[in-house]
Amino acid sequence: MVENLGVTHERDGTLAVVNVSGRIDSATSAQFEAKLETVFADLPDALIIDMSDLAYMSSAGLRVLLVVAKRASAESRPLILCGLAPAIQEVFDISGFSTIFELAATRAEAKAQARA
Amino acid sequence: MFRSLQFQLFAGLVVILLGAGVTITISTREQMRDALIAAETRAARNMLGQIELQISNRYRELLSEKLRIVNERRDALEHLGGFTVAAAAAHEGLVERGAASRAEARALTLDFVNAVDLGASVEAFAITRSGYVLAHSDPSQHGRDLGAQRDIKGRPLPEAVQEDIELDGKAYVLFDDAARDGADAGAHDADGRRFAHFREVQTLGLYIGVSDRIGDVERYVETGVEATISTLADTLAQVRVVDTGFVFIMDDTMEAVTPPAEWAATLLEARDPDSGLIIPELLSLVSSEDAPTAVDYALPGAEAPVRMRAYVSYFRPLGWYIVSTFPAAEINRPANDLIRQQSVIFAAVLAVALLLAWLFALKLTGPLRRLTGYARQLPQQDFTHADGPHGALDRLADTRSEVGGLARAFRFMEGELRDNIRALLDTTRDKERIESELNIARDIQQGLLPKIFPPFPDNPQIDLHASLTPARHVGGDLFDFYFLDDHRLLIAVGDVADKGVPSALFMAITKTLVKSASAQETDPAEMMRRVNTALSADNPRAMFVTLFIGILDIRTGTLDYVNAGQNPPVVVPVTGAPALMREISGPPAGVMEGLSYRRLSRQLAPGDRLVIYTDGVTEAMTDTNEEYGTDRLLSLLEAGRGQDAKQLVDCVLDDVRAHSGAAEQSDDLTLLCLTWQHDPD
């Protein structure tokens, strides 16, 4: 089985940018969750999750995002998702997650929003 | 058999033993042969030396005996001579005293000599200075002139006598009186040699002599030599050089003193083909006095010439050639015999060694065979029980050899096998237990869902069918439907995030919450709000459920509903294409506390069909991650207009399964189909 999920984490100043690629489903969601946990080890001012390279996200992935959102909210740190592909945007729209997450079109916009 | 370790060990030992044996035999063979030949040669030479020594001793003995006899005789002659001279001296004294004339005295002396009898072969005589015999105890000798007689050294007798007397006062002369013609001369033998003692009687002008025959002394020596030869012949006839070789003696004239062996009797006349010499001559040519000399020659035989070797020694005093000779081939025989004997011993040792090697190989491979037997019966062991003692194997494991190491490895392997199998059994038992628990959970979960279809057989207005297929034993999907009152039908379809046991628990809670909320509220939005509040209240893992709750008034066909993030349901209208109900009421339940949901409404026409599904349908994947998709669902629903709810559900499920093919079902899969008809009344 090919590596279905890729998660990289970089810092732009006090911003944490996580780039996620591949697929997030039941099989990979735990890995996704674990990776995001590490981001909170060094608490950023804001967390941006760039999903430009993400091909698929199931409800398991949504749940992980929700966990992260709750954590970010508890720490009073904004969480911004950006670069949602149309299919994923659709998932967000269908599930109503679009209304509870802060979304941006591009990473640059997300950074701008985070610093605003 | 030939590939077995035992055979290989055995064969290896055989090869080593044979190799060592053959190498030793070959390397020692030449040395041994040389040593044996040298020993034989030495023996032959020594024998020759012994014989020569024996002969020379015997000869020396004879000579010394001869000397003793000669001395004895001389003493006797001297004594007798003294006696005769004393008589002559007395007569001389008469002349000096004047008692007698010189002539008278001389006559008296001559008479005395003539008359004297000294016995045996001793003779007394008186001669003039020129050698004329005046008187002789043997009357036949009277008047004989010995002036021409020469002594053994070739001097004329009178001169020799005079010379010695002048020097010493007496003379001893040895002469051969062969010219003497006496009757007694031929009686004994032709030997006329005599030994004479002379004194001078000055006054009377005489030499008084006493002589004795010495031929008997010579004869004594000759007899001794003959006896020696006879003894030697007897002795030498017994002597065997090497095997059929022999020792013989020949003299200067190439005549045999002692004969060669019978089988080589022709040796004395035969000619050596190589040198062209008569064999005795060849032997005599190479001889030396100092040491035995070796010579090879060929003795013509009946069929082929026999190659011979001889050691020749020359004994000068007797002029004898002592020859030790034997067939050259025989000198190798002791060496060959020894080698043969050695080979036999080697073969015997080899046989014993092979037997021992076989036993050794057997002993060495025995433990391996025991190990093999142990390994063979290993699979029959009951590994679930604790390890017991193994008897022979334990004893093997105690030894320090490589086999012991192997045995220990076997024991270790068996122990590990036991542990692993026990662990595996434990794991399997755990797994089986979990499996059985999950099966029970699955039954319980399935029991939560309505399972009697058609659910409302008496109600012609509702054609409803639903199916739920969890991806695992238990799943997070749910559906439910029941009448809230006579004409209001509640339908709910939900999908808990993720799947498996956590989802299943959440699903059960959700279903219960929907049920209780529907008892408390009439507005589906309120119901959803209650469900969300309850689910969000204590939700550390941020579990959530996408949920559709609809309430259909079967009298009017009005559908009031809330959609909390659930996949948009499909309406298949009697007229018009199937369409998605995209509007949503809010986020999934459990996401966030305090959310309120928007109530939505849809007016159904009689015959309109409502299809609610979870993402397990539209997101069903092929093994190349191709989604089933909404479009395919819509076209299938369009095509399935004529089918009833059950047929359509089965049709969609079949199509989804066909799409997934061999790929594992990735998510729970739920489908609910409802067709509403107008009340016929």
Image (cartoon, coloured by chain):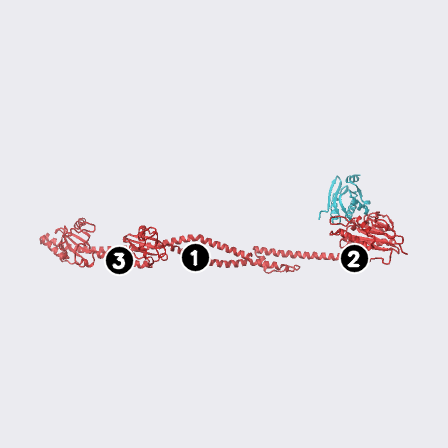
Chain colours: A cyan, B red
Whole-number angstrom distance, CA of label 2 to CA of label 1: 99 Å
Neighbour class for label 2 at 10 Å: few (<14), some, many (≥20)? few
> Where is mark 3, residue-wise?
B224
Left or right of A7? Residue B573 is right
Q: Which of marks 2 and 1 is nearer the N terminus?
A: 1
Neighbour class for label 3 at 10 Å: few (<14), some, many (≥20)? some
Q: Which x, y percent locates residue B314?
A: 30, 52
Q: Which x, y percent locates residue B224?
A: 26, 58
> Where is mark 1, residue-wise?
B340
Whole-number angstrom distance, CA of label 2 to CA of label 3: 145 Å
Q: Which x, y percent locates residue B334?
A: 40, 56
Q: Mark 3 lies on which chain?
A: B
Please, what secondary structure does the residue beneath circle 3 have? helix
Neighbour class for label 1 at 10 Å: few (<14), some, many (≥20)? few
Q: Which x, y percent locates residue B619?
A: 78, 49
Amino acid at pointer 1: Arg
Q: Mark 1 lies on which chain?
A: B
Q: Residue visible at 41% across and 53% down?
A: B33
Left or right of B626? Residue B346 is left
> Where is mark 2, residue-wise?
B444
